[in-house]
Amino acid sequence: MAKAPMHARRKNPILRTPLPTLPPHARSRVALGLTAAAARGALELQVCRDCRAVQYPPREVCRACLSSRLIWRPHNGEAELAAETVLHAAQDLYFRERLPWRIGIVRLDGDANMVVYVHDSVGSAPCRVRVEAALDRAGEAVLLAVPPDGNADLSADPKLREMTCDPRGRKILVTDGKTAVGQAVVRALATAGAEMIWAGEAEPWKKIAEAATLRDLPQVMMVPLDVTDSHSVHELAGEIGAKVDILVNTADCHRTLTIGAGGALNAAQLEMDINYFGLLRLAKEFAPFLKARAADGPASAVAWVNVLSIFALSNYPPHGTYSASKAAALSLSQALRADLYTAGVRLINLFPGPVDDDWDQLELPPKLSPGALAAALVVALQGSMEDVYPGEVAQDWLERHGDNAKALERELSEGSQ
Amino acid sequence: MAPSGYADVVLAAPVTVPYVRYSIRGAHWFLGRALAQLLAAAKIPKDRIDGLAVASFTLAPDTAVGLTQHLGLTLRWLENVPMGGASAVVSIRRAARAVQNGDAEIVACIGGDTNHTDSFRRNTATFSQFSQDAVYPYGSGGPNTSFALLTSYYMRSYGARREDFGKLCVAQRNNALKNPLALFKKPLTLDQYLNARSIADPLRLFDCVMPCAGAEGFLVMRESTARDLGMPCARLLAAIERHNAFPDDPVQFRGGWAMDRDELFAQAALKPGDIDFVEVYDDYPVINVLQFEDLGFCGKGEGPAFIRTNSFEVGGTFPCNTSGGQLSVGQAGAAGGHLGVVEAIRQLTGQALGARVAKARYGLVSGFGMINYDRGICSGAVVLAAD
């Protein structure tokens, strides 16, 4: 498979940087069910609770039995490509700027027809395919037909690469490179082909042996960055802001205090200063740069990643103040996502469960290793999703939360007794 | 139960508001001009029109209701027919029953649209909920994408070649060269057709209708009314419509005509071979072929052979789209379905603007409309006879 070059060719500085255009945004409310699943990297379709008929396009009422009890369920996407075309003319600017597009119609096993993008590596119609959901640059779900077996490499298709935020050939700022998670993220991004990684360090005087070895990686440059200091964030943005393609916010302050503990207020203020205000400072300085370069050729600005916590979904009282700061960051990230999507820049949130690091020492396994967290982050960038719940605990909490958020709240409060 | 026939119903006063590629006017202008021309053709005052059936994509936020006040019409019967290329056939069916039953005496059926430079994209982006959710976000190709998929599927399934579709397009262009109202004035060669700019494989430029602004109109009334007014008219022998036929076909290779054609010909007391000329809906040539097959002029899958053994000019073995059709006259939005009806009335009443089909007694007009998602939903046809 052809890969994007490791080092994207430098663009001619005399040329105007194209302004970002977006694929069409409008969807009916019911169609956003597809987006909700695609945001997690899943394909879900409406199924009739009464007659089991699979529905597509999304609708309000079952096409077979008129039941209104339609529920979203995971689908394996197995289908046949019935016909295809290569589109050479488009009305919308986004598509026009990227012609041609390979488009097909597939017949899903289970009787629904789907208009889809067809991956380069799919043979000619008729043939078997697997349908996947992805997020386009407007953040809306679209369907892709990929070969029926194996994992489809979206980046191997020059058009479908648009659905990804592939770190290959890109320049990335990791806001804190010195924590266990930060180090793992820097290494994983280097392995995934990042062209340049700036690793922030808030306290250069603090010597951490493992972090020091990051300097041995040729792509990595340590840069001073203290997200609690507006001046520091401003300085760095002035220096590298116009070059950053992906910002990964690993800056994190995690104290394990219940709200009644001595020192909880101070800890909470520090947590908020890094986890919430830090994100706000970064957004203020870096988001405008990312948006301005969202259509800047094959190595355009594409993504903003936050390492949040599963505790952001529902407060975990033993880490009460930390949970609250991550919930605040989650809320703020939604505002930032709305802003970034106006230019087609994706915001990805990771919601790990307890990480196998110092601050989750007292949490029982299974715990997520920093390496596994970093790997999930890279997979999310290479694929097409915006909410990532890596590891068993995160998946378990997510399921409980979706099933009954109030029950999860009670379960978590019991855990603190 | 077989529906009762249309004895005593006639169509008269075929009018066309000349097409233009783009217009700064609103849809109301074109529809208003069509009505004015109808009155002039029928030599009747405005208050003689007591029924109106309107089809337009660009009339929003108005519908037929707004048009009554805009045009100062006081009516006792009103239809808004949002069925795209099937609107004319459906308007005829509705209007025929109204005049038969005395709900209206003279119904004006008009279809028309304006076309601003960005109209087509806007209409495509918001055409339907399914289209907005599940088609437009895939390249924004609009009907080009849908018909490319249909065409590619048909070619693979039945062995049609680009040359077959090209033969239809070239014949229609030849017909259009004699029609002073056609927007396309230059001959089209098969080579030009085959080597035109690619639009959506296998479609190239001359497979695709050109959107434009314009309007078409005609009157529906009882034969006695036409006699009193001294108007030449064509008789309505039969009419069918069908919506969302064959929903389980994986890709559309047939339309609703296949369900209803036996009824159509039974009602007309004719066989396909009795028809002297056809006006089929032709936004893309593959749809012509589906209509040839589904209306019984040849069997399913025999379209390519039918094309190779017939000629489609006005003087040919199977005169088709005798004014040039939408492919060579232009597609004035919802007037696209009215174009064929208006041309058929002209042919059957000896008022053809271009070439005249010799001894035309029976004409068949079919309509097709509304790519709601992956296929055209509305289909219909009428058989008309010379008086």
Image (tube, coloured by chain):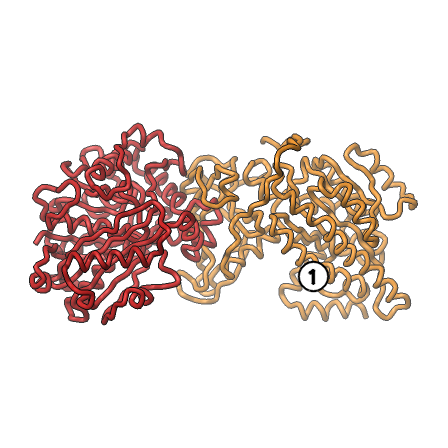
Chain colours: A orange, B red
Tell me the residue at 44%/37% (across/down): A88
Q: Position of residue A336 (x, y in %)?
A: 67, 55
The furthest residue to the top: B191
Asked where in the image residue A80 lies, by quadrant, the reply is top left
User: Would residue A149 be found to the left or right of residue A271 on screen?
Assistant: left
A289 is higher (above) or lower (below) than A361: above
Q: Quadrant of the N terminus of chain A?
A: top right
User: Would residue A112 be found to the left or right of residue A132 on screen?
Assistant: left
Residue A100 shows in the view: yes
Residue B1 shows in the view: no
To which chain does the residue with label 1 belong? Answer: A
User: Would residue A383 be found to the left or right of residue B181 on screen?
Assistant: right
Q: Position of residue A191 (x, y in %)?
A: 73, 36
Tell me the residue at 38%/60% (across/down): B60
At numbered mark 1, what does the secondary structure look like: helix, strand or loop?
Answer: helix
Q: As rendered, which of A85 and A64 lies closer to the eye?
A: A85
Tell me the residue at 28%/54% (across/down): B86
B270 is higher (above) or lower (below) than B5: above
Q: Position of residue A181 (x, y in %)?
A: 79, 48
Q: As rendered, which of B32 and B246 lies closer to the eye?
A: B32
User: Would residue B282 be found to the left or right of residue A64 on screen?
Assistant: left
**Residue type, label 1:** Ser
Q: Quadrant of the C terminus of chain A?
A: bottom right
Q: Which residue is mark 1?
A: A331
Tell me the residue at 30%/37% (across/down): B158
Q: Position of residue B131 (x, y in %)?
A: 43, 53
Across the whole image, how many numbered discs are drawn on residues? Answer: 1
Asked where in the image residue B5 lies, by quadrant, the reply is bottom left
B242 is higher (above) or lower (below) than B178: below
Q: Residues within 10 Å of mark 1 (few under 14, many from 20)?
A: some
Asked where in the image residue A215 lies, by quadrant, the reply is top right
